[in-house]
Image (cartoon, rainbow, N blue to C red):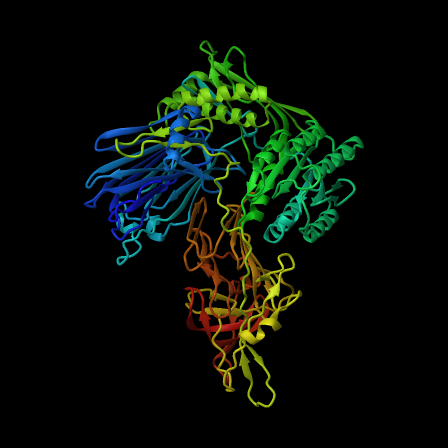
Amino acid sequence: MKPPAPAHACAIVLVLLPLLAVLQTTCAQKNAIDIYSLTVDSRVSSRFAHTVITSRVVNRADSMQEATFQMELPKKAFITNFSMIIDGVMYPGNIKQKDAAQKQYSAAVARGESAGLVKATGRKMEQFQVSVSVAPSAKVTFELVYEELLKRRLGVYELLLKVQPRQLVKHLQMDIHIFEPQGISFLETESTFMTNELADALTISQNQTKAHIRFKPTLSQQQKSAEQQDTVVDGNLIIRYDVNRTLSGGSIQIENGYFVHYFAPEGLSMIPKNVIFVIDTSGSMMGKKIRQTREALIKILEDLRPEDHFNLISFSREATQWKPSLVPASTQNVEEAKKYANSIKAQGGTNINDAMLMAVQLLDTATREEQLPSGSVSLFLLLTDGDPTVGETNPTKIQKNVQEAIGGQYSLFCLGFGFDVSYAFLEKLALDNGGLARRIYEDSDSALQLQDFYQEVANPLLTAVTFEYPSNAVEEVTQDNFRLFFKGSEMVVAGKLRAQSPEVLSAIVSGQLPMENITFQMESQVAKQEEEFQKPKYIFHGFMERLWAYLTIHQLLERMVSASDADKQALETQALGLSLNYSFVTPLTSMVVTKPEGQEQSQVAEKPMENGVNFSKAGVSLYARVHDLPSKTVGTPGLNAPVLYRYTSRKLDPDLRIPSRKASSSSGGPTILDDYLDETMEETSPTAPPPAPIQAPTVILPLPGQSTDQLCVDIKRTPGPLLLLLSDPDQGLEVTGEYKMEKAQFSWIEVTFKNPQLQVHVSPEHVVVTRGRRSSEYKWKETLFVVMPGLTMTMDKAGLLLLSSPDKVTIGLLSWDGLGEGLRLLLRDTDRFSSHVDGILGRFYQGVLWGPPDTTDDSKRTLRARGFDFDATRELKLDYQEGTPGTEISCWSVAL
């Protein structure tokens, strides 16, 4: 066991993610280890990212201190180098075959030392950590390098960067260079820590093929306030982009004797699909999982196209099919399926084998009887959260049964919900049958994760895609045939050029459409391509060879999952050789980190696997939440004045059977109010109730024209719950909402922009932003700063979400928790509304006429908007626009 540190020592943790630096000090001697420089240089050349993180620290204490370099990198990335420079001496990390490092690893474990330096830490990241003792006044330089190929998903490439220094850093600089010869069509940055002050430290420059994102905050910009020396830099920085595309054979790029072929043609029509949803409804899915599954299924069913065919199978101890055969995705069938999905309950065991065989039989029958569209694509979507417990429970036999039944005719995609599921079992099940597996993380956005995965495979464009190159021109080509190509994805093929290759590299890509074969042909000038990558100083030269090795290793590791024992050894030998030759830390290699003499010298970095056991299970337990209702006046016999009682009402959720906030006081379901009434009832003195507090109106509208006055609008009656609040076709803007009269508040508000195509859906629980087919969930009162072409989206700690653009009306959305709590809408820059603005609120910005004050009461006037007269009264209202607790204002109040 590691001996305890001296009483005066500080434990320091420096955390660096792709752009992350975290310093945690666990003793009173704050910042004894001072990070005086932290730089990140990430160069993305044709989707291949080479990232170098350099951290320089100094021990400012008068005693030995321990500094721990801790960083996180993407799961798909490979570490290629790590080194420490201590007192001018370099201590490198050496990458070896895993067996060669096993003795050092085992010896360290036997001594009680922490030998595993890399572990999985979340959905997308792995953590790397090294500790070293630092003498007084000594300096240490840590440098870590990793590489990854950015994968196109739902139409974008994404680079996730995290920034968390947790102390002020004198020299904090992050540079991201992107070079895409095809041309950059879209670039977006998102941050969860950016403030208006920090936004000035972020600069973005872009031309046709290059982009440079720099974040270089000063000490004052990093500082929370003049009184607080803590840093405000704490959160995520995400960069998303895409490249220009045409209906062609893609882009062939060549550098230093290697080529890479990117294929993602635009303009193809969707192929009709036949999909069977196989849904686990066993007892372990009870509660939040089954509710989120129902929610996701309903959304997914709404996305089916009329030419698609589908069916649903739910399974626990037994498998049950919704319909006896696949049915067209007509409006009537989809509505029936949504009702069925909404009714599924969780109970019983897990019979995966019978459910999958039933699904295959359904597709076999439909195919044999020619019930499905010609040229359509058939696939299964299996969702489960546990291992098989009923029927056939041997995973190997289930995999064999399913593979034999499918027979290479259909694709199977597996979703593993949570951490109790055997991911290795699902991964092999999917890869054996031309699909892939994905883990769904238990969180508030699990339903969105399910929907996003479905969107990735919901739009097939081509089947049986094959790449062909002249045999005399190339060699050692990566995977060159693919079962399916989906909208928003990209196929990547790489290889070596032969020594005597032609001056022009040609390629033929063939695939199948529903009713015909299609062929793409293209050529690439070798010398011209070589020259294009030699000049720029901002790219990582020699990257294409490393890209080829990276891609080859990943594909070999994937093939090993479903390979026979005889083939697996040959694949492993090939992947190991490439890992060692290119110094990649992969599941087959380890990196031994050396240290100065006298310190622990047996730390070993190894690549964790998705199906490993390093995942946290925190936060998956069920819990009860109590909902407090407002005071209620209860009549009391024998008293003339009312008596006030404050009570708490709790309802039983039918899924969990535990107290839950889900049910409202007016909804059905068993109540346990009587059991708790005596404990929660407090009697006050029989005095008259205090005057009603000033409430916040439903909406506050800045009045049109030059007036600084405001119009306070309350909704008292509506033609229905769904309301068109604002619509301006010239602005490309629409705001809708669902208003519940019984609660006097919005259930949700949705803002839709035409350019850029964006939808923001807010509810009291969260914010969901949908761009194209991608959806992201954010929690209220979390800092957010998104810059995209034509729109900026920000949210502060008060929960104010602003959607702004230099030439558009600014829309604000707020989760108000003051008096009259609920969702609130804000408008700014309303002079930018066009003459075509409409909606129940938009009409107040079109030809508004005010009548004269009432002859007997000048606090009353008549307001005419779009031919309707409204009684306006001067009243005191609570202004929510600056956040809680709000301020009193005098405004003209109208009721709709």
Q: Report x, y in % for residue 529.
A: 43, 20
Side of 435 relative to 37 (left or right)? right
Q: Nearer the viewer, residue 887 or 111?
A: 111
The relative height of residue 745 versus residue 48 in the rendered view (above or below) is below
Q: Is residue 331 left or right of residue 806?
A: right
Q: Position of residue 800 (x, y in %)?
A: 44, 58
Q: Is residue 395 above or below residue 452?
A: above
- Residue at 57% x, 80% y: name it: 633
Q: Quadrant of the C terminus?
A: bottom right
Quadrant the N terminus occupies = top left
Is residue 496 found left or right of 632 in the rendered image?
A: left
The outermost residue toward the top is 500
User: Is residue 269 shown to the viewer in this render?
Assistant: no
Q: In the drawing, does residue 149 fall left or right of residue 734?
A: left
Q: Could you tell me which residue is drawn at 49 percent across and 19 percent down?
A: 574
Closer to the camera in the image, 210 or 485: 485
* Residue nearest the observer in this picture, 663 or 221: 663
Q: Position of residue 878 (x, y in %)?
A: 45, 71
Q: Is residue 378 visible?
A: yes
Closer to the camera, 622 or 43? Answer: 622
Location of residue 228 in the rendering, given as x and y in whole percent from the top left corner:
28, 57
